[in-house]
Image (spheres, rainbow, N blue to C red):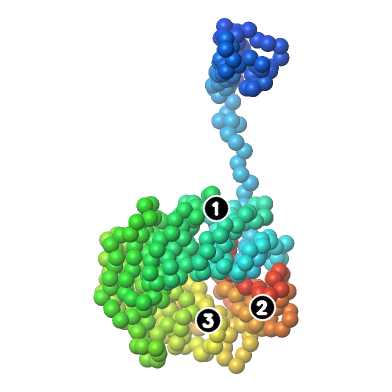
């Protein structure tokens, strides 16, 4: 910018300021100082008979400021006029949700940091993180929702929603949460204001799924063959979906990665016993909310969790009484079954790699107390090397989580004996090689229970 251009801008600013001041003087002579620019500070005001309107001074003065700001905007770069950006959230952090706390973990150094404490009842029944990674919402079994800031590492005031929550979902924009409370329905939470804004009453509600665009919530019940779609913008029911399989109870509903199909999976109801029972899969086209013909999958589920859907949406993997079963989502035809040692409680847990090439199953074999990881080739069901012992002995097994890039498996566990009340471990396993890394020590805070929830990862 040349000296001549600077001079012309200075002259423009001076004229703008002078014109604004003259406009103020035409309405009222200034009193000493700047007291007249502060509402309520003068003995004269619009409410006094004969008094001049006091709002003229700040309005006209504000016009002067606006003119100056407008002219300055021609000179000052736009970036300098914007508010400073929010502090970035570290990408190398993980957050273990535990009883009464969230434990930050530096995943680069494998060191757990000081827990973020909160004083509410009940262990974690669900947890979600906003898309920007700045806030975690913890839902407890006793019906509390607790916001936890990953930036300040503090917990905000909780809200009480009641019921017995069993899971939580979040809208894509991070503004709305949905908490399922079997068997009554789903609580709707405004996550920005941290308050409940509605409740979707559905008889015998058991599980739910949300479309990727956040517009439709599917809720299934535990005693029939009905799936209820809910318009999340109006919280109104869409026509219920009645499947063609009338004699089974739903266990889970999951969404395909592309959001075009939801899959309800359950066991055929053979009375009080499930011996000899089989599993039935019902697909739902989310564009039309119409069911596809149900297909029989095979052995009944063990109750270990919902099926995993391959990234291409063509194959599902379910934990069954026989092991891990892969089946086609189009026909229900079983591709393979990887047999695993029949485990007592707790059941096995499974994760699928981001590229869909491997299935990881964590559990405790019978007559053993050692946490074991099985790596399975998704195409064939064959093991990728021998079973991997994580080095943990089991008292209570928490969740297994796979890093977003698929390179590391994290397995949480608490040992037997008095030590479980004070400390637990999170094993790290190289997903490709099965090599066990350094165990991360996790401090626990509760003297009664030490429930563990998911490991949440920083923003990707």
Quarter assignment of residue 205: bottom left
Residue placed most toward the observer, 187 or 425: 187
Mark 3 secondary-structure assignment? loop
Q: Give the residue pinned by disc 3.
A: 348
Query: Residue at left 46%, top 60%?
Result: 187
Nearer the camera: disc 3 or disc 1 = 1
Which of pointers 2 and 1 indicates the residue nearer the eye? 1
**Horizontal side of residue 456 vs 336, given as left or right:** right
Eyeballing the image, is 339 above or below 254?
below
Sequence-wise, the earlier of marks 3 and 1 is 1
Q: Nearer the viewer, residue 76 or 117?
A: 117
The percent position of residue 246, horizontal first and vertical second, equals 28, 78
Distance from disc 2 to disc 1, alpha carbons, whole Å, reads 32 Å
Q: Give the quarter of the figure containing the C terminus.
A: bottom right
| Residue 346 marker | none
The N terminus: image quadrant: top right
Q: Extreme bottom residue here?
A: 367
Residue shown at 57% from the left, 16% from the top:
46
* Tag 1 residue: 194
Q: CA distance from mark 3 to mark 2?
A: 16 Å
Residue topped by disc 2: 414
Q: Where residue 16 appears, x then y in whole percent?
A: 57, 12
């Amino acid at each position: 910018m040349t000296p001549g251009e600077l001079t012309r801008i200075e002259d423009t600013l001076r004229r703008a300021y002078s014109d604004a001041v003259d406009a103020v003087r035409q309405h009222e002579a200034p009193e000493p100082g700047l007291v007249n620019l502060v509402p309520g500070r003068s003995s004269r005001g619009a409410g006094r008979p004969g008094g001049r309107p006091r709002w003229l001074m700040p309005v006209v003065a504000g016009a002067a400021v606006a003119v100056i700001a407008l002219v300055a905007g021609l000179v000052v770069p736009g970036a300098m006029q914007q508010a400073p950006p929010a502090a970035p959230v570290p990408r190398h952090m993980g957050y273990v949700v535990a009883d009464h706390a969230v434990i930050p973990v530096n995943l680069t150094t494998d060191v757990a940091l000081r827990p973020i404490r909160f004083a509410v009842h009940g262990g974690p029944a669900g947890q979600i993180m906003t898309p920007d990674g700045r806030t975690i919402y913890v839902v407890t079994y006793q019906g509390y929702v607790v916001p936890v800031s990953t930036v300040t590492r503090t917990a905000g005031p909780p809200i009480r929603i009641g019921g017995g929550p069993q899971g939580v979902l979040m809208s894509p924009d991070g503004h709305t949460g949905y908490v399922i409370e079997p068997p009554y329905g789903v609580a709707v939470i405004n996550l920005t204001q941290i308050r409940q804004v509605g409740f979707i009453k559905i008889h015998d509600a058991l599980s739910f799924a949300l479309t990727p665009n956040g517009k439709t919530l599917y809720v299934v019940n535990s005693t029939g063959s009905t799936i209820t779609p809910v318009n999340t913008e109006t919280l109104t029911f869409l026509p219920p979906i009645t499947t063609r399989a009338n004699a089974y109870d739903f266990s889970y509903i999951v969404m395909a990665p592309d959001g075009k199909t939801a899959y309800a999976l359950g066991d055929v109801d053979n009375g009080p016993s499930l011996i000899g029972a089989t599993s039935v899969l019902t697909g739902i086209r989310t564009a039309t909310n119409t069911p596809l013909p149900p297909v029989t999958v095979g052995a009944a589920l063990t109750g270990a969790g919902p099926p995993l859907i391959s990234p291409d949406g063509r194959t599902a993997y379910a934990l069954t009484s026989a092991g891990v079963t892969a089946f086609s989502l189009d026909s229900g035809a079983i591709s393979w079954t990887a047999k695993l040692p029949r485990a007592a409680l707790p059941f096995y847990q499974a994760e699928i790699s981001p590229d869909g090439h491997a299935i990881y199953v964590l559990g405790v074999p019978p007559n053993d107390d050692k946490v074991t990881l099985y790596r399975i080739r998704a195409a064939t069901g064959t093991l990728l090397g021998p079973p991997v012992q994580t080095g943990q002995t089991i008292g209570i097994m928490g969740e297994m989580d796979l890093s977003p890039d698929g390179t590391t498996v994290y397995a949480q566990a608490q040992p037997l004996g008095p030590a479980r009340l004070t400390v637990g471990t999170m094993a790290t396993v190289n997903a490709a090689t099965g090599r066990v890394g350094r165990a991360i020590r996790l401090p626990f805070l509760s003297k009664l229970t030490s429930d563990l929830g998911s490991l949440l990862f920083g923003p990707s």
